[in-house]
Image (tube, rainbow, N blue to C red):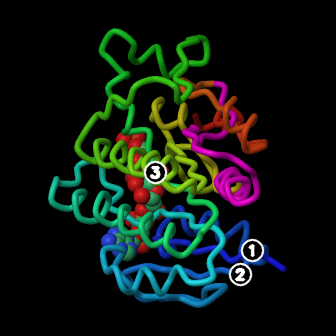
Amino acid sequence: MAQSVLLTGAAGRVGAAILGGLADDYEWRLLDRDPPTEDYPGEFVVANITEEEAIREAMEDIDVVLHLAGDPRKTAPWDSVLTNNIDGTQTIFEAAVDAGVEKVAFASSNHAVGHYETEERTPELYRADDDYLLDGTEQPRPGNLYGVSKVAGEALGRYYHDEYGISVVNVRIGNLTKNHPPIDYERGQAMWLSYRDCAHLFDRCIQADYDYEIVYGISDNDRKYYSIERAKEVLGYEPQDNSAAHTDD
Ligand SMILES: NC(=O)C1=CN([C@@H]2O[C@H](COP(=O)(O)OP(=O)(O)OC[C@H]3O[C@@H](n4cnc5c(N)ncnc54)[C@H](O)[C@@H]3O)[C@@H](O)[C@H]2O)C=CC1
Ligand SMILES: O=C1O[C@H](COP(=O)(O)O)[C@@H](O)[C@H](O)[C@H]1O
């Protein structure tokens, strides 16, 4: 029988990439605060992730949670990230543990480590001949309050894993764009995540066995300063795309 997967933030861009690749592969329960405007492959729950009761109900009979819902803006103000990204993520973990969910994959971000991109390192860092690599074992260095909220989400996962044993993978997503990498944006090309690699990566988050992990979610770009070795090793991630293959780079 297919695993039951709760996808929060299902109506957003990352949700679209995941469902675009995996719609037929799982029993989906989709959740978003915005009501659906199209057909979705499963039950659609309209709820805010800060609503404890609604989230507890949404968690019933779920095997795996892909937790994407949150404010994705790098300029997001503190009150929004505090509510949507930190409070909301705590509500998700608490309900997941109580419901006996096996795994949570958390949509973290490149902005959790944005301040490694110092003036001395950039723009060389974004180029294929530069060998500087972050691999997920480094200390977080958020580049903005949004990044701080993602580090908090990763810490919540650490706590719920250590305290309750739930499996947690934090995917520090780079820059997801459809069809081709960002144009005239070296940083975006270095951290490009294609739609099909995104779907495959979250598929591996559903299928693989792990304890607590931090991995980078980017395609196999020639330009890169995030290692994808841990995602390959632990999750079996096999990306197919590379921003260098696009002539409009
Ligand atoms: N798109 C990208 O390149 C990247 C995205 N991420 C993370 O991935 C996640 C998804 O991002 P996108 O799909 O790009 O954003 P999006 O804005 O397209 O989608 C987010 C969805 O979450 C929903 N949502 C927001 N707050 C909610 C709440 N309190 N309760 C219920 N639903 C809520 C929104 O209605 C929206 O449909 C976010 O957590 C973001 O921080 C991280 C790095 C890069
Ligand atoms: O976390 C996120 O990062 C991506 C890439 O960051 P950017 O600074 O290069 O734009 C961003 O597009 C996305 O909206 C955000 O959630």
Disc 2: which residue: 27
Q: CA distance from mark 1 to mark 2?
A: 6 Å
Q: Which comes before the other along the chain, label 1 or label 2?
A: 1
- Give the residue type at disc 3: Gly
Query: Residue 66 appears at what percent x and percent y?
Result: 56, 64
Residue at disc 3, CB closer than 8 Å to ligand 1: no
Between marks 3 and 2 in the image, the one whose residue lies nearer the viewer:
3
Looking at the picture, does residue 105 appear above or below residue 188? below
Q: Residue at x 53, y 51 (%)?
A: 176
Q: Are marks 1 and 2 in contact (CB under 8 Å)?
A: yes
Give neighbour class at mark 3: few <14, some 14-19, many 20+ (Cα, 10 Å).
many
Query: Residue 17 appears at what percent x and percent y?
Result: 61, 63
Q: Is residue 237 left or right of residue 186?
A: right
Q: Is residue 62 left or right of residue 122?
A: right
Looking at the image, the residue that sits furthest to the right is: 1
Q: Which comes before the other along the chain, label 1 or label 3?
A: 1
Describe the element under mark 1 as helix, strand or loop.
loop
Q: Are marks 3 and 2 in contact (CB under 8 Å)?
A: no
Describe the element under mark 3 as helix, strand or loop.
helix
Q: Residue at x 75, y 43 (%)?
A: 237
Q: Are marks 1 and 3 in contact (CB under 8 Å)?
A: no
Query: Residue 180 appears at what percent x and percent y?
Result: 61, 48
Q: CA distance from mark 1 to mark 3?
A: 21 Å
Give neighbour class at mark 1: few <14, some 14-19, many 20+ (Cα, 10 Å).
some
Q: Is residue 71 left or right of residue 59?
A: left
Q: Residue at x 69, y 34 (%)?
A: 220
- Magenta span: 197-222
Q: Quadrant of the N terminus?
A: bottom right
Q: CA distance from mark 3 to mark 2?
A: 24 Å
Q: Is residue 9 left or right of residue 180?
A: left
Disc 1: which residue: 3
Disc 3: which residue: 157
